[in-house]
Structure formats: structure tokens, C-alpha cells
């Protein structure tokens, strides 16, 4: 029951599919680094959200590509497509987050961090 919106960088046709292209600037577009950044920044949720959103408007076979572009010389570029298992997880995550948002909106309660003073210790790896 929530209205959602998205800002897609590019939608085009490619080999029989509607393709969503999402440009990502990064320091390092290598496979391992982009993979790490994708998990940390929730790119799997974004891709699943965009694909499901377009399919809600007009069902069609679609693919989603990240175009990772390095910010520094030599400005290397890599194109990545999430595997099905990652998209499935992203779909579950964005639905969970939308449900949480709907509950907060309905109740007016927006949880944040712990209230009061919380004891803090640095991680073991730092000692």
C-alpha cells in the first residue's frame, strides 16, 4: 500500500531484454572491491527494487547491470550483473525494509539508536 519511486539512470533494450543500467562511481571497480561495496551499500536491494518496480508497471523480461566507473586515472570501467541468489536476497531485504517503513509511518514511532549512555569498547582487532 505504499507509493514508491525510483530514479533510474538508463533503461534501454539489449538482446531481447529491457535493461536497466545503473552508473556507480567508485575508487576501485575490481570484482572483489565492487562486490564488497555492493554488499555494504545495499546495491542488491536497489537492483531488486528497480526490477520489481518496473515489472509492477509493465511485466517484461528484464536485466539489471551496474556500470562501475573509477573516479581516478586510468578510469577503468567494469559491468556487473547480480546473480539470481543475490537478487532474491535483495528482494527479501527491500520488502522487509518497506514493511518496517510502513509500520513506522502508521504508528508514528521511528526507532533509532539506543537512548541514554551506552558502554563502548573498541573491537578486539584494534587492541
Image (cartoon, helix red, strand yellow):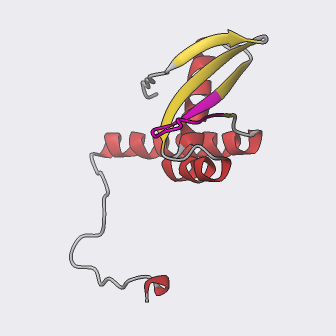
* Image location of residue 83, percent across then percent down: 74, 40
* Image location of residue 102, percent across then percent down: 41, 39
The front one of 56 and 32 is 32
Q: Residue at x 49, y 42 (%)?
A: 26
* Image location of residue 8, percent across then percent down: 49, 21
Which quadrant of the figure has residue 10? top right
Q: Residue at x 74, y 17 (%)?
A: 61
Which quadrant of the figure has residue 13? top right
Quadrant for the C terminus in the image: bottom left
Viewed as shown, does residue 118 lie left or right of 95?
A: left
The front one of 73 and 87 is 73
The front one of 16 and 33 is 33
Viewed as shown, does residue 91 lie left or right of 119?
A: right
The magenta region covers 65-78
Q: Residue at x 52, y 29 (%)?
A: 23
Tell me: residue 127, above or below residue 46. below
Amino acid at each position: 500500500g505504499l507509493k514508491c519511486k525510483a530514479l533510474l539512470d538508463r533503461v534501454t533494450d539489449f538482446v531481447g531484454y529491457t535493461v536497466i543500467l545503473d552508473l556507480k562511481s567508485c575508487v576501485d571497480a575490481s570484482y572483489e572491491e565492487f562486490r564488497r561495496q555492493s554488499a555494504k551499500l545495499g546495491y542488491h536491494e536497489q537492483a531488486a527494487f528497480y526490477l520489481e518496480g518496473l515489472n509492477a508497471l509493465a511485466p517484461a523480461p528484464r536485466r539489471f547491470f551496474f556500470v562501475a566507473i573509477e573516479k581516478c586515472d586510468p578510469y577503468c570501467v567494469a559491468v556487473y550483473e547480480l546473480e539470481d541468489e543475490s537478487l532474491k536476497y535483495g528482494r527479501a531485504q527491500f520488502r522487509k525494509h518497506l514493511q518496517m517503513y510502513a509500520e513506522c509511518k502508521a504508528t508514528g514511532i521511528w526507532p533509532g539508536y539506543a537512548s541514554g549512555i551506552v558502554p563502548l569498547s573498541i573491537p578486539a582487532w584494534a587492541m
